[in-house]
Amino acid sequence: MLAALAAHPCHDLATLLCFLLAMPKQRSERASKLSVSLFPADYERMNQIIAFMLKQGVRVNASMALRLALRTARIDAGLLMVLKQVEAEDGRRK
């Protein structure tokens, strides 16, 4: 991007901004913020992960515990059973 920017004749701020906005967006490797609602059972499971890791000599925060849970979750038909439990707990879906 810097090479393209250097080759582009930007004479004013508006031209520079138009050029930057027209550049293709690159996927960031940085984390994105996400707001989630957790129920007591979710907090308990998260705390179990944190406690397990602490027993292993590794300190993790809530964000890391949630990422560990997501990355180790099995993706199979069992998710459908858990979905029914989560929906019933949530109470917003029919």
Image: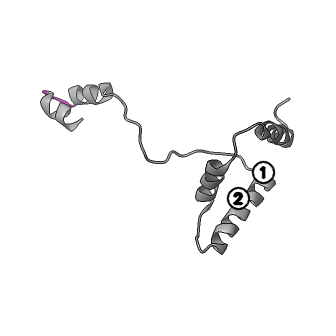
**Which residue shows up at 71% across the image and 63% down it?**
47
User: First in sequence: mark 2 or mark 1?
Assistant: 1
**Which residue shows up at 25% across the image and 27% down it?**
19
In the image shown, does 57 or 18 lie closer to the viewer?
A: 57
Is most of the magenta stretch helix, strand or loop?
A: loop
Count of all numbered marks drawn on residues in the image: 2
**Which residue shows up at 59% across the image and 65% down it?**
60
Q: Is residue 50 above or below residue 75?
A: below
**Which residue shows up at 69% across the image and 69% down it?**
51
Mark 2 touching mark 1, by CB under 8 A?
A: no
Query: Could you tell whether 69 is left or right of 77 in the image?
Result: left
Q: Position of residue 44 (x, y in %)?
A: 77, 60
> Is 10 one of the magenta-colored residues?
yes
In the image shown, does 48 or 33 lie closer to the viewer?
A: 48
Amino acid type of the residue that numbered disc 2 sits on in the rendered structure: Met
Numbered label attached to residue 86: none
Numbered label attached to residue 46: 2
> Is 77 one of the magenta-colored residues?
no
Amino acid type of the residue that numbered disc 1 sits on in the rendered structure: Phe
Q: Position of residue 11 (x, y in %)?
A: 13, 28
- Read off the magenta span: 9-13
In the image shown, does 75 or 18 lie closer to the viewer?
A: 75
Query: Could you tell whether 72 is left or right of 92 in the image?
Result: left
Q: Position of residue 14 (x, y in %)?
A: 24, 27
Quadrant occupied by the C terminus: top right
Q: Which SS class for mark 1? A: loop
Numbered label attached to residue 39: 1
Quadrant occupied by the N terminus: top left
In the image shown, does 25 or 51 lie closer to the viewer?
A: 51
